[in-house]
Amino acid sequence: MPQATSPSNQPTDSSGLPPDSLAALDARLLAFARIRDWEQFHSPKNLSMALAGECGELLEHFQWLTEAQSADLSPDKRREVAHELADILIYVVRLCERLDIDPIAAAYEKIAMNEARYPADRVRGDARRAAEYGDSEA
């Protein structure tokens, strides 16, 4: 079955959104939960706990690896890591939907805050936390 296209000739899903948009993913996840009557379980508390669990599962794939090994995963391990990252993204998107938070806007706001906290000309190549810089440094 061919994909529909938008006026700009980009593929769209059944909602008319590009299939790689967060809005399309959010709509699909919401439909998935509603069809199964799972929204009752998707409270912010439960979703944040599930998110933490999935982050732990991601960490397990890298535990005890060297820096070099962690950057050179086998194809099978890379696919497993991709699935853990997908679980994390799914819970983030669901949590944002339940709390009415725009994750893109929140990310841009946080980047702007970090740009102010960590001016590039003062912190380049230095990974300390903002509180660890003296007043004269950052």
Image: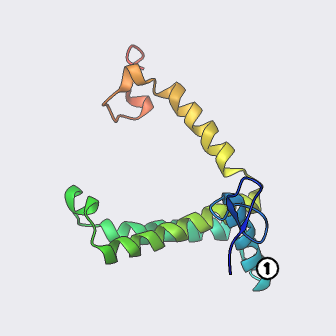
* Residue 13, image quadrant: bottom right
Residue 63 position, x and y percent, is 29, 67
Left or right: where 126 falls relative to 110: left
Count of numbered badges drawn on the protein: 1
Residue closer to the observer: 35 or 96: 35
* Residue 11, image quadrant: bottom right
Left or right: where 118 falls relative to 47: left
Which residue corresponds to mark 1? 34
- Which residue does the image show at 79% across and 67% down from the upper left? 15
Above-or-below relation of 35 to 89: below
Residue closer to the observer: 113 or 35: 35
Q: Characterize the local packing of mark 1: few (<14), some (14-19) or many (20 or more) Cα atoms within 10 angstroms.
A: few
Q: Amino acid at mark 1?
A: Arg
Above-or-below relation of 107 to 2: above
Left or right: where 18 falls relative to 75: right
Residue 97 position, x and y percent, is 74, 61
- Which residue does the image show at 34% across and 27% down from the upper left? 124
Above-or-below relation of 91 to 68: below
Residue 23 position, x and y percent, is 72, 59
